[in-house]
Image (cartoon, grey):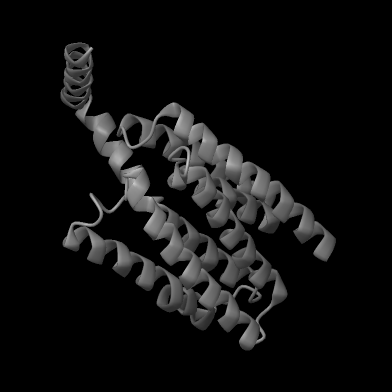
Amino acid sequence: MFLSMKKRIFEIQNMKMSINKSFPVLITISNIISNVLNPLFSLLIFLAVYSYEKSDGKFNLTSFLLPIALVVIPIFGWIYWNVKKGNYTNMDVSNREQRNSLYLFNFFIISIYIAALFYTKQNFDYILIIIFLLILLVVMFLSNLFIKSSMHTSFNVFVSALFFSLNPIYGLIWLFLTLLVAISRVILKRHTVKEVIMGALIATVISFVYLYFDIQNH
């Protein structure tokens, strides 16, 4: 049994090496898509568009820089520090057990950000977005106890819903990009098809609930 398992692992490794050698362009493109549309960057892109759309065509630099300072930099810094310390295998935090501490740190950071938004009396529509982002993270954390759902796919599905609430065309475009992200995660062997589908399903449910509340709020 041990020899059979060892042989299977060897075959998978050879298959991965074969794919990398046979389709270098595909691997490169997948890496670009996966890196550019990672959860933090996808959220930032939406926030930039949201700030522009909600400010009568004028880009609100302050509302864009605040989440960078309070959310993006702390989370990116946490991941980078843990990679340097050897606590995380890579910047993707691919290991399922390692992700638990990342989720807990994310809860802490997002909760502080929500508190800051309430304290400074920000627009409730925006606060609702961040609250549902926190809900998504909580459900992803619970899912992670059983299966390593794709965070890239999940976040981008949710961002698609956020874009859809601004403009259906934006939402459809981002949904197409999300499909490319999901495929790239499988090609890069960061996730299995099952893990990508699980991430998409979780985000789809959260997204529909968010859209319902967004419609009711207007």
Between 198 and 165, the residue placed more toward the observer is 198
Q: In the rendered view, would you say 194 is above or below 103?
A: above
Q: Where is residue 16 shown, x and y percent of the image?
A: 22, 24
Q: Position of residue 195 (x, y in %)?
A: 46, 34
The quarter holding residue 73 reads bottom left
* Relative to 94, residue 61 above or below: below
The residue drawn where x is 55% and y is 39% is 200
Residue that lies at the very extreme toward the front in this rendered image: 1
Left or right of 140? Residue 22 is left
Q: Residue at x 58, y 60 (%)?
A: 133
Quadrant (top left/top right/bottom left/bottom right) for the C terminus:
bottom right
Would residue 158 be found to the left or right of residue 81 on screen?
A: right
Please state the horizontal and vertical placement of residue 134, each as a whole percent of the image: 57, 62
Residue depicted at x 51% and y 67%: 48
Q: Residue furthest bottom?
A: 120
Q: Does 130 sit left or right of 187 as displayed? A: right
Q: Is residue 59 visible?
A: no
Image location (x, y in percent) of residue 172:
61, 43
161 lies above or below 187? below
Callout count: 0
Q: Dividing the image into 4 quarters, which one contains the N terminus?
A: top left
- Is 18 on the left or on the right of 184, as rendered? left
At 63% from the left and 56% from the top, the residue drawn is 162
Does residue 138 show up? Answer: yes
In the image, is residue 199 above or below residue 17? below
